[in-house]
Amino acid sequence: MFGSIVLEVAIGMIVCFGSVALIASSVQEAVASMFRLRARTLLAGVTQLLNGHALVLDIYNNALVNPRSDGCAASIGNLSMKLAPSYIAPLNFARALVDVLGRGRVAFGNLRPALEAISDQQIRDCLCSMYDRAAGNAAAFETELAQWFDSAMDRISGAYKRQAQFWAFVFAMAVAIAFNIDACHVLTSLWKTAATGLLHLPVPAPEANVNDAVSTLDRLPIGWSDPPGFIETLYRIPGWLITATSSLFGAPFWFGLLGKITNLRGAGDKPNVAA
């Protein structure tokens, strides 16, 4: 097909890894949506940012942050996760916090007593310091609050991504075991098939979906024939781990790499033709 056994086998392995990564990430996203993991992680992040202060509940009852709720939740536990936001714009958080501190009735210039009344010393000192630096400029104070929130959310986002990668690995491992996608066996089988000139694998499009991925996997040397023995299962574990680990790179990485490899030409890239 490509005139090179190495290229054909490489494409086969990339198709395999990309398909598994696509299936695993799709399952992970479905589970995350079902359990509202993004909204829960965001709420946990805001709670950590404010050290669990009652301001968290007040902010989530504010329409700038949580416009879909009725704003009447009596406790964090009473917040509806179905309506809770999965993302908060930093400036909306800042304005909501100012509204909550002033109760919508205190002018910005008279906000200092409300800041000094905050029971948590760390949060009180932090907000008072930002308020003093703003020197009576409401926009400057909101900007500082937004930057403070944004930097905290960067860390929360990193934690969520690590959690998502962990579960993607778990789901990829489950897929590898369920379909017996042993990377070592697949590599060996593809090499032998390519050597005979009989290897013809469909190349999924970059926008391939889960059905395309499953259909592609059916063309690969995977699956169970007979129930394996204990020793045989042990031999397959490294191959399953390699397959599951490949999902950590993500489906876009594998499909992007696939596009680059399929565009390889013996004489280099095709030159542009002048108009």
Image (spheres, grey):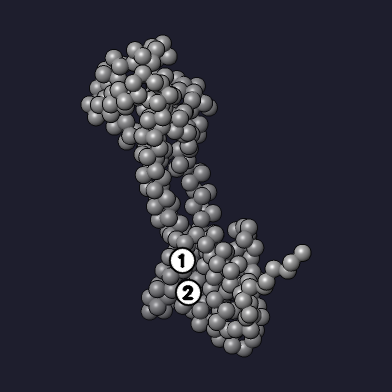
| Amino acid at the residue labelled 2 | Ala
Q: Residue at x 46, y 66 (%)?
A: 246
Instruction: Judge whether 203 appears above or below 23 on screen.
Output: below
Q: Kindly state the secondary structure of the residue where label 1 is placed.
A: helix
The quadrant the N terminus occupies is bottom right
Q: Could you tell whether 33 is left or right of 136 in the image?
A: right
The amino acid on which the numbered mark 1 sits, given as a three-letter code, is Ser
Circle number at residue 217:
none
The answer to whether marks 2 and 1 mark residues whose Cβ atoms lie closer than 8 Å is: yes
Which residue is painted at 63% across and 58% down in the image? 207
Q: Residues within 10 Å of mark 2 (few under 14, many from 20)?
A: many
Depicted 137 relative to depicted 147: above or below: above
Q: Is residue 56 left or right of residue 92?
A: left
- Please give the name of the residue rendered at 37% of the width and 30% of the height, measured from the top-left corner: 144
Q: Which mark is residue 183?
A: 2
Q: What percent of the width, then of the height, locates residue 84?
A: 47, 32
Query: Residue lying farthest left?
Result: 121
Q: Which of pointers 2 and 1 lies earlier in the amino acid sequence?
A: 2
**Closer to us: 239 or 266:** 266
Give the CA separation, mark 2 to mark 1: 10 Å
Between circles 2 and 1, the one closer to the viewer is 1
Q: What residue does disc 1 label? A: 246
